[in-house]
Image (cartoon, rainbow, N blue to C red):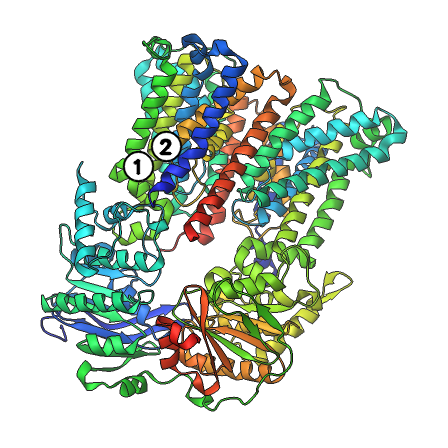
Amino acid sequence: MNALNRLLSRPWLWSFAAALAVWIATVAVTAGASSGGLTDAALTFAAFSVFVGIGQMFVITLGPGNVDLSVPANMTLAGTVALKLMDTQDSMILPGILVTLLVGLCIGLANYALIKALRIPPIIATLSTSFIIQSAAIWTNRGLRIKPPPVLADFATSSTFFVPNMALLALLVSVLAWVLLNHTIFGRWIAAIGQSMPAARMAGVPVDGTRLATYVLCAILAAVNGFLLSCFSGGAALNMGNEYLLMSIAVVVIGGSAVAGGDSNVPGIWGASLLMFLIVSMLNTYQFEAGYRLIMTGLIIIAVILVASGRQARPR
Amino acid sequence: MRRSSDTMRLLVPVLSLAALLAGVFYLQPRAMSYTGLNLLFNLAVPIALATVAQMLIMAVNDLDLSMGTFVSFVACVTATFLNDTPLLGIAILAASIAVYAILGVVIYLRNLPAIVVTLGMSFVWGGLAVLILPSPGGEAPAWARAIMTVKPPFAPVAIFASVLIAVVAHMIVMRSSLGVLIRALGGNAKTVERSGTSILKIRALAYGLAGLFAVLAGVALVGLATSADANIALRYTLLSIAGVILGGGEFIGGRVSPIGAVIGALTLTLAGSFLSFLHISPDWQIGAQGAILIVVLALRLLLNRLESRGATR
Amino acid sequence: MPLAPGALLEVQDVVMHFGEVTALDGVSLSIRPGECIGLVGHNGAGKSTIVSVINGGLAPSQGRILADGQPLASYGITRARALGLRSVFQELALCPNLTIVENARIAHPELKGWRWRAEARRIIAASLDQIFPGHGIDPGAQVGTLSIAERQMVEIAMAFSNSASAPRIVILDEPTSSLDAGLAAMLLAHVRRFIAAGGAILLISHILDEILSTASRIVVMKDGKVVAERPAAEFTPASLVEAMGSSTRELQGRRQAESKGAPVLTLDLPNGQGFHAGKGEIVGLAGLGGHGQTEMLLALFDAHASSWWPARGPEVAFVAGDRRSNGIFELWSILKNTTIASLDDLTRRGLLHRPVEAARGAEWKSRIAIRTPDLDNPILSLSGGNQQKVLFARALSTRSPVVLMDDPMRGVDIGTKQEVYRIIRAEAEAGRTFVWYSTEMEEMGLCDRVYVFRDGAIVAELKGEAITEKAILAASFKGEGAAA
């Protein structure tokens, strides 16, 4: 009984429950005909949301006002630069991966340098860098669509033991993120900063170092996501990151992490990512227009934040 | 001089605008004419209105991430319902302003993060806009078109409109007692609570006013563009935030400047023209806007430092 | 039934609980026209809480409130204002982003119409002129640009100003904490004029001379109860201190530890003399609140703790006084709050080792007597005093040789204080250095050496027997004489 109560109090449970309900509702309409394909697609597309969602989650954990708006531009730039460098050659895969990581590292450093040097809120700092990154991506991309090396394209679109490779990779990253968040000093530091930056500073937490590392981590995950997405979809497109800005924030919030920071969880990212994909495919199955899908997405975000805040409503 | 802090706040935006204007005139002397100025500043009117709307939200320490989609939604309503069945159009716009007021109250009552709620609302407004106008179209009401294209003597309508917006916003936010209460919420909400004034009422009014200005922005935009589409004003979310900041406003503390916000909006509009006159490759136009944003923020930090050094001496 | 006939406002048997803590335990108080009530007691005695109940900011858990002899069914801020009640709070209650005139509009909701600015300016200027003649404050100035003393003057003038309704009861909570002697005298003179005209004042101050010279009746609070209530004339400074109960009596008798060797901590200040502390020394930072003591502690901390690189074995640890804003982590358990500063001692192969962490927590739970059944309970389940003990445990469990303390005993009960004083004493004997800022005069008596601050600079250094309340106050206000 106690164990059940503990499970029910987990903030991430609801996103999984909702995802399962939507899955059943969708499969019911198609009489189970598409359940396998739907699950596969859901796992693959959820994986892309998970990569950026985890990065964004670490940033949001840092407390109110911390959010990385440069995620979409970052994805586009990393995907473009890496694919251009690899130029469909299988032998260039390793340099491609390295340059992806380098792009992420530089963007993360630039973001935090602006936040710190100009003392501006992260939302404006990452917005400014995203403008510049976006231009850099347009300049590199030039509308050419370079295909990924065959080995990578193959890997990105196939499965191992009936599970999409992308999902396996995302699972690996999730486990590492979970260990980092819950079992290392770094994780404690992030959560401490998110609850109160002055208190964290006074407790001896190296606040600037931790925040810098977090922004770099988020940028690297976004860059990796851009790399993988362009391998999966057969090339980098200029607008490929667009939907991942709001998505990365939404999956963190819906997954039950505290929007005000200091209290995050990794499993919820998965539940929310699956939910977001399944809602879209459910509404597609029911043949709703795009407008209704958007409205539903918005209302779900607001509903989740309303439910989540129930515990901490304003006293008096 | 003690009262100089508000003046200092306006110094950077005024200087940035003057520098950009000088740059544009140097690069393109023909811009120094009635038509030239009209072309340069035409699009500034809706942006200035949206910036004032965002400023009202920021005055109570919140942030509206749905500004762009909301202005797009209003544009779609204006180009369809307001043109075809004006009464229904007005009712829809009035209802959307009421939604803003309700959001202001709910965010406070449930202690929600405004960023996330308005993020959710941005999907809702965007969805509604797509439902109204699935593809670009509609037609601007004749009166909106007429107002935006009127040709007054001496200066183009965009200049008159900007001055009017700045003056009206200044009267409401800086001079009226409602404006004082709105800024007080940003400065120290506890004080308002202790005086026995209803915080809910003020927040509803602040959000409602923001909704009203955003509606005006949408109508003005359609008046200029003659038709609408669901993505017509998506840039306005970021432009309006940047405009407030450029104009000397701050994210928290109720420190805002309506005149500065309008100047900030003009600066951002001009920055685009300036960059195209500079023959910067179109690839780098967005990036250059980001760079301008960074430079202005750096300037402001520098000026703030000088000011605080002067104050401690 | 009203206990005191003719009282403007009366509270009866008020009980107030905050979670586990009982802040007020059956307090009754009546405020009559033409009198100034002096309210005294140590920090945490419940003075601020009873003030919040009286001004309508807090609804009591139990008890009645009567106005003009009539019990009130409902009471709140609006009702209190309508009764003519005004308050000057300890913390800043003005909006820094608004001008003084605009702040007057907030304080007086009845100011309306097109001419409200002129009217507000007239009201606030008249009040300032009356209380602080020759103040030189421009009502059009933004509050954020005023000095601390000017802000306090404006707040006081705001409370006494009248627009539609005149103030009948004014609560002054430590009104002179940032005023110099001249301004304080002006205020106290105005208080006497105000009560002579039939008004009522509730005056809270830790400067007992002010209370004895100004109040007509004195109420002494201790541990959430009223322990004495008599006309002011029946009190002497000694009997008042006696009634409040000394918080340091047990620890009288000074330590004889004179620190030798090179200082472990030094800091040069832009003005006045520099700061240094030796191994095993307890150094006090005294003076009026807000005169640069906290800033110096922060400067010391910043100089010795990097914000970029994790330190292996930190050089300094910090105990915050403002628990809510820079002390506790509200979402965390007691255990996590205790160990956050010493995590590098608690890892195995890069990962946190939960059993080691739990053992460390249990050790300090018993050493410092944190009263909780389970360290995994949320930190907010603890009383304020026990939360403060967690902050002490956090700092003391590190290996850092220096502990900085920023007025850590605010709102802590006497029992906890005694326990903590003993631990500080023992740790200092063992070679730890303490730098201790406190607004409690008695705590300076526990220090080996005291620096007195004024206007951001050290103006005097007192040693051993020379550390007395009188010497500290003299240096706080004048400074020049003692600094030589």
Picture residue at 62% right of the left edge, 59% below the top: A205
* Residue sitting nearer the eye, B201 or C150: C150
Q: Earlier in the sequence, mark 1 or mark 2?
A: 1
Q: Which disc, if any, is residue B258? A: 2
Q: Which disc, if any, is residue B174? A: 1
Marks 1 and 2: CB-CB under 8 Å?
yes
Count of marks overlaid on the render: 2
Farthest residue to the front: give it: C484
The quarter in which the N terminus of chain C is drawn is bottom left
B142 sits left or right of A271 in the view:
left
A208 sits left or right of B255 in the view:
right
User: Residue C215 occupies which quadrant of the picture?
Assistant: bottom left
Picture residue at 44% right of the left edge, 76% below the top: C484
Q: Find numbered disc 1 in the image and state the secondary structure of the residue it sits on.
A: helix
Q: Position of residue A313 (x, y in %)?
A: 42, 51
Picture residue at 52% right of the left edge, 66% below the top: C297
* Residue sitting nearer the eye, A24 or C86: C86
Picture residue at 29% right of the left edge, 64% below the top: C52
* Chain designation of label 2: B
Is residue A132 something one can see in this rendering? yes
Give the residue type that dot 2 points to: Pro
Q: Is residue B293 above or below residue C52?
A: above
